Image: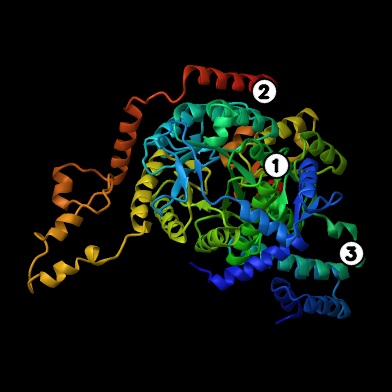
């Protein structure tokens, strides 16, 4: 097995010490940081992403792999140019006004981060105006909203309306989710994407980003 | 039972240690002050309230084990403990989608559906109390108030309410007192009980704190609900999740009984597992059922109050055989776990969709299960000892007095059929779906006695109008 193949496997299986050693070894053997990033770390996360989608890897395992990859990236970061580090997108994410439940949102935020998105998590019970302000401040191209309660779902529509009124609707892909949310509801309120679970959110975000 | 008495005792020790050293976050200054005055150790900065062992144990002792959830019509009171050693039941709460009988796709719940739901539940002999679903055709600011009004107008049985805001909480309490005949009458016979929740792990949010305070003030029984999701908001193991729920419920029982010693609280662990493949939460998995059974045991033995959990329902996204199978398994496991209330009748898709036909089916299953769990005496008379000793070898029992005396001691199903195949055809019995539909149509077509007097109805309408004007 080549060094990069071993590195990918160790990322996938969460072996942090081995990853740190192998990243350094790759650099010491003359591989460029960019090469290690693309063909080692990012390639490993592509495998992890595919295995998560096919449900061969469980979410805690995916998160462990992402954390392990991050550790390896820590060695490469000083050696990389900014263009090598470009995120897949900037996501402002939060649960809507009146909703205090955040476990689903937290999970999506963690997985989006693992998938290469720059995630700005603004927490729970977020007013539409706060979403708008954060979108402006960050220049985000994704807005993620979550609601667990049927009674707070309408705030998703209110938030989209606020984003539109602020002239930012064209800037962002709006992605929604949560237990009572459906594709039909997403269509009804003019969201760009709906995800039925955290794993699907990553796929939908990537698809929207490719548009 | 999954836990031995020694295990329960050990977990109670852990729970007492938890309450004393880690405590709960109580996000309400007024409640924190009241708890401090009652002897809790309160850090106003972090809003953490800790309860010493003796404070917990004394408060738990005052929590009543016997009380009544009264019915509006006076005919369907729910006694705790169950007089026959069986269980009570309740319909699902908070669903957003309605499956019209005969349809294949759900649609958003409408206010008129609350009347239908209440009417069906009112006519099902094994449905004890009823909650309203989440309606879509009323502004959300007062949808809960409007739904409560419609529930009270069509129900007759005990109502269980879930406020969406502090202001609608006040409207619901007002309606409870009006429908219940005034403050004193309501305290004597509470015709409405209420949901108070923790936010796992170990936090009580402002509105639920308001619920504890408002409910204890007027004597409205509280269903202290804990909804941990294994691996997300509680440990991933069933016992870890069961313990989390039990500790939170213990906290709520203590809080209610510090505010009002002797206040009735029903411990309501609603156990979910998080599917680690995709993050979805479910309640029909065997892990959730195991956790729920253990939580029921802990609530009953450790906390010492009646226990209530999902005793019906399914994670199936459509109303199909999986929905009915999972509902029946859920009901069976929870009935045998000793729960005093089997909740969530009539739902599928993890409590987000409701079906009147599933409600009718659940009613039937509840009847079957009550027959199984009600203790039956075993003595020589029941055994038929004299008959056994007298019967001829190779004889028949058909004509014996013992058979005559006990032959009707069987559960009389109204919906399940056991006829021979040719009779099924010649008598046009029809499949279960058609029999459920026939029962539904029979209920809906029958005239219903009014539930409320004109005066009470008008007073309740005034509450709704006020809510529309101030919240809308």
Between the C-alphas of marks 3 and 2, the distance is 55 Å
Q: Which mark is residue A80?
A: 3
Query: Which image quarter is the N terminus of chain A in?
Result: bottom right
Up the image or down, A141 lies above or below B18; here it is above
Residue A56 visible in the picture? no
| Lateral position of residue A112 relative to residue B85, left or right | right
Q: Which mark is residue B472?
A: 2
Labels 3, 1: one chain: yes
Viewer-closest of B264 and B152:
B264
Q: Which mark is residue A159?
A: none
User: Residue at the location (61% across, 45% down)?
Assistant: B263
Q: Position of residue B14 (x, y in %)?
A: 68, 67
| Lateral position of residue A133 relative to residue B112, left or right | right
User: Residue at the location (71% across, 60% down)?
Assistant: B54
Q: Chain of mark 3?
A: A
Up the image or down, B436 lies above or below B135; here it is below
């Amino acid at each position: 097995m080549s060094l990069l193949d071993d590195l990918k496997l160790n990322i996938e299986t969460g072996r942090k010490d081995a990853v740190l050693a192998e990243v350094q070894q790759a650099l010491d053997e003359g591989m460029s940081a960019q090469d290690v990033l693309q063909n080692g770390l990012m390639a490993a996360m592509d495998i992890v992403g595919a295995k998560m989608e096919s449900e061969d890897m469980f979410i805690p395992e995916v998160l462990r792999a992402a954390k392990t990859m991050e550790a390896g990236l820590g060695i490469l970061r000083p050696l990389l140019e900014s263009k090598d580090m470009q995120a897949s997108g900037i996501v402002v994410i939060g649960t809507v006004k009146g909703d205090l439940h955040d476990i689903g949102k937290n999970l999506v935020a963690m997985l989006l981060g693992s998938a290469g998105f720059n995630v700005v998590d603004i927490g729970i019970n977020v007013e539409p105006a706060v979403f708008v302000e954060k979108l402006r401040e960050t220049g985000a191209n994704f807005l993620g909203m979550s609601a667990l309660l049927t009674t707070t779902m309408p705030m998703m529509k209110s938030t989209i309306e606020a984003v539109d009124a602020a002239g930012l609707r064209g800037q962002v892909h709006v992605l929604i989710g949560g237990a009572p949310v459906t594709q039909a509801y997403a269509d009804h309120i003019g969201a760009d994407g709906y995800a039925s679970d955290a794993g699907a959110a990553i796929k939908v975000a990537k698809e929207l980003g490719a548009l | 039972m999954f836990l031995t008495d020694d295990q329960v005792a050990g977990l109670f020790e852990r729970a007492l240690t938890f309450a004393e050293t880690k405590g709960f976050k109580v996000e309400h200054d007024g409640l924190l002050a009241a708890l401090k005055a009652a002897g809790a150790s309160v850090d106003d900065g972090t809003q953490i309230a800790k309860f010493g062992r003796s404070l917990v144990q004394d408060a738990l002792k005052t929590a009543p084990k016997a009380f009544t959830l009264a019915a509006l019509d006076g005919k369907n009171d729910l006694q705790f403990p169950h007089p026959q050693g069986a269980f009570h039941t309740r319909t699902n709460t908070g669903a957003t989608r309605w499956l019209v009988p005969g349809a294949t796709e759900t649609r958003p719940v409408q206010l008129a559906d609350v009347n239908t739901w209440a009417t069906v539940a009112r006519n099902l002999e094994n449905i004890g109390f009823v909650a309203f679903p989440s309606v879509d055709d009323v502004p959300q600011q007062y949808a809960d108030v409007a739904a409560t009004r419609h529930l009270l107008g069509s129900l007759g049985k005990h109502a269980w309410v879930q406020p969406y805001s502090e202001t609608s909480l006040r409207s619901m309490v007002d309606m409870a007192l009006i429908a219940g005949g005034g403050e004193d009458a309501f305290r004597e016979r509470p015709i409405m009980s209420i949901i108070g929740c923790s936010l796992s792990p170990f936090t009580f949010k402002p509105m639920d704190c308001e619920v504890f305070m408002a409910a204890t003030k007027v004597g409205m029984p509280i269903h202290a609900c804990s909804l941990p999701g294994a691996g997300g908001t509680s440990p991933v193991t069933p016992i870890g999740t069961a313990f989390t729920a039990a500790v939170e419920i213990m906290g709520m029982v203590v809080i209610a009984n510090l505010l009002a010693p002797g206040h009735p609280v029903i411990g309501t662990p609603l156990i979910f597992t998080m599917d680690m493949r995709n993050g979805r939460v479910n309640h029909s998995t065997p892990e959730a059922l195991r956790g729920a059974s253990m939580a029921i045991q802990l609530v009953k033995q450790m906390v010492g109050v009646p226990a209530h959990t999902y005793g019906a329902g399914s994670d199936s996204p459509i109303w199909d055989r999986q929905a009915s199978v999972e509902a029946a398994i859920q009901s069976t496991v929870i009935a045998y776990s000793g729960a005093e209330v089997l909740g969530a009748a009539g739902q599928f898709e993890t409590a987000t969709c409701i079906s009147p036909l599933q409600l009718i089916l659940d009613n039937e299953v509840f009847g079957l299960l009550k027959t199984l769990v009600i203790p039956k005496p075993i003595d020589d008379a029941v055994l038929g000892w004299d008959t056994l000793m007298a019967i001829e070898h190779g004889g028949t029992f058909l004509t014996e007095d013992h058979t005559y005396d006990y032959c009707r001691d069987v559960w009389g199903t109204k919906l399940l059929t056991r006829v021979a195949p040719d009779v099924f055809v010649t008598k046009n019995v029809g499949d279960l779906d058609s029999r459920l539909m026939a029962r539904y149509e029979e209920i809906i077509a029958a005239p219903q006695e009014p539930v409320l007097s004109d005066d009470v109805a008008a007073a309740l309408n005034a509450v709704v109008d006020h809510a529309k004007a101030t919240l809308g």
